[in-house]
Image (cartoon, grey):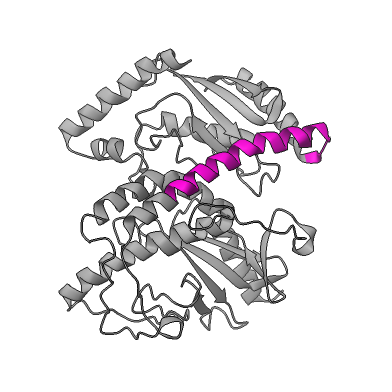
């Protein structure tokens, strides 16, 4: 293995092990030089929390020679998301001018609309087999490349395209669902339904052969479609329990693995002096864990009792578990539906270790002085108070303590 390959392998591993929310990378084991990268749209920009995917081809001369980068979140080559990212996918690295404020405003408006429509909604609909009208696409079963059912491939013209970010995008969508809805409500006040996009001076019209961002504003439709996606994701997670019980009865390895991990985690937490919690399987199903966490004395959680469910897929760990609190919580990192923005925790956090996921949720609850990261502030109202003025912070503490005191009512 040459130095270029060693360096690339090390850099990819560093990114994949980190909790960097801005970027994710993946590649086939057989081809490390062809990388897929997913960039999360920066908060407080028109690209906010969109899923923008790129291909990167690294030459043998890397790092002496830069990789070739191509954008593939372009609506089939019909949408140009940036003056320096062409509809065909070409990425031009240069400095953008900031002189045309009127055009900038009009451009920002349509970027936000198309980020929601293409980089979020359309992507999730494709993953979930949803049509724009909310009906399901009937797909023929197919053999996955290499026989690995955990990896997603799309067969087009006899060519298999690797789709490594399906699960990640689904989980991030659940994090940012409230933010997407809030954005739709705010943006639809700025335009009229059916209003045409303003063409920019640097754009070239011409449909699929052009190099522009053309279309009309239709936020009511985007709202309906994004709600359909959320409902479909809820149904999908519910279905994991059914799939899991079948796998358990069929004595599949993943079921035995999760049963063993549950028993080991239960012993660990029973002996733990750092966290007090109770664990049980829902209906004796090793794919659904019910966790009751008791607030630590002499902390803001003192007297609280918090219940959350951890649902596992039969494709775990390639599909990561979905965690949801049934106890209402006023917390800046737990959205209104009870979904926490957590990472696997513990001394040696691993995404394939179920206990690490529980430790990650506990760490989120108990952290006292978190660093500010707008990408994890998924409860809009709580976040505004938590990071606001002194008065707002006091109000946050009041509402947080109130939710702790009332938590026993939901046990």
Most common secondary structure along the magenta stretch = helix
Position of 195 relative to 116 (above/below): below
Residue drawn at the location 48% of the way across and 55% of the way down: 133
Decide which of 54, 21 is in the foreground and name it. Answer: 54
Q: Position of 345 compared to 248: left or right?
A: left
Position of 58 relative to 155 (above/below): below
Q: Quadrant of residue 271?
A: top right
Position of 5 relative to 352 (above/below): below
Q: Is residue 102 magenta?
A: no
Q: Quadrant of residue 256?
A: top right
Q: Which residues are drawn in magenta?
A: 226-253
Residue 78: percent from the left, percent from the top? 44, 77
Residue drawn at the location 41% of the way across and 61% of the way down: 117
Residue 30: percent from the left, percent from the top? 73, 69
Q: Position of 375 compared to 4: left or right?
A: left
Residue drawn at the location 44% of the way across and 33% of the way down: 338
Q: Quadrant of the N terminus?
A: bottom right
Q: Is residue 281 visible?
A: yes
Q: Residue furthest right?
A: 251
Decide which of 107, 134 is in the foreground and name it. Answer: 134
Decide which of 331, 246 is in the foreground and name it. Answer: 246
Decide which of 411, 55 is in the foreground and name it. Answer: 411
Residue drawn at the location 55% of the way across and 52% of the way down: 135
Residue 204: percent from the left, percent from the top? 34, 86
Residue 169: percent from the left, percent from the top? 51, 54
Q: Is residue 346 visible?
A: no
Q: Is residue 239 magenta?
A: yes
- Count the labels in the image: 0
Q: Position of 101 compared to 261: left or right?
A: left
């Amino acid at each position: 293995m040459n130095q270029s390959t060693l360096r690339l392998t090390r850099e990819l591993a560093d990114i994949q092990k980190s909790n960097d929310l801005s970027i994710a990378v993946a590649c086939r084991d057989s081809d490390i030089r062809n990388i897929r990268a997913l960039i999360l749209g920066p908060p407080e920009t028109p690209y906010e929390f969109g899923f923008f995917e790129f291909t990167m081809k690294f030459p043998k001369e890397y790092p002496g020679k830069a990789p070739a980068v191509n954008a593939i979140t372009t609506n089939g080559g019909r949408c140009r998301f940036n003056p320096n990212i062409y509809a065909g996918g070409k990425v031009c690295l240069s400095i953008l001018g900031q002189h045309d404020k009127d055009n900038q405003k009009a451009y920002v408006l349509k970027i936000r609309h198309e980020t929601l429509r293409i980089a979020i909604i359309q992507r999730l609909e494709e993953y979930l087999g949803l049509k724009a009208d909310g009906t399901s696409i009937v797909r023929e079963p197919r053999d996955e490349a290499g026989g690995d059912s955990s990896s997603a491939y799309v067969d087009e013209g006899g060519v298999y395209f690797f789709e490594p970010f399906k699960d990640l995008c689904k989980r991030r969508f659940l994090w940012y669902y409230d933010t997407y809805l809030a954005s739709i409500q705010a943006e639809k006040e700025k335009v009229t339904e059916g209003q045409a996009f303003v063409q920019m001076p640097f754009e070239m019209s011409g449909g699929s052969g052009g190099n522009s961002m053309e279309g009309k504003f239709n936020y009511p439709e985007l709202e309906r479609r994004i709600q359909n996606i959320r409902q479909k994701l809820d149904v999908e997670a519910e279905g994991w329990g059914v799939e899991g019980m079948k796998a358990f009865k069929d004595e599949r390895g993943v079921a035995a693995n999760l049963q063993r991990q549950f028993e080991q985690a239960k012993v660990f937490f029973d002996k733990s002096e750092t966290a007090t919690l109770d664990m049980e399987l829902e209906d004796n199903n090793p794919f659904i864990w019910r966790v009751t966490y008791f607030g630590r004395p002499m902390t803001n959680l003192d007297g609280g009792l918090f219940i959350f469910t951890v649902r596992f897929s039969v494709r775990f760990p390639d599909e990561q578990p979905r965690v949801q609190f049934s106890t209402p919580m006023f917390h800046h990192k737990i959205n209104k539906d009870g979904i926490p923005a957590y990472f696997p925790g513990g001394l040696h956090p691993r995404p394939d270790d179920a206990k690490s996921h529980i430790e990650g949720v506990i760490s989120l609850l108990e952290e006292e002085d978190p660093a500010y990261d707008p990408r994890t502030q998924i409860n809009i109202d709580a976040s505004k108070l938590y990071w606001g003025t002194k008065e707002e912070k006091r109000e946050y503490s009041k509402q947080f303590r109130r939710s702790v005191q009332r938590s026993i009512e939901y046990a």
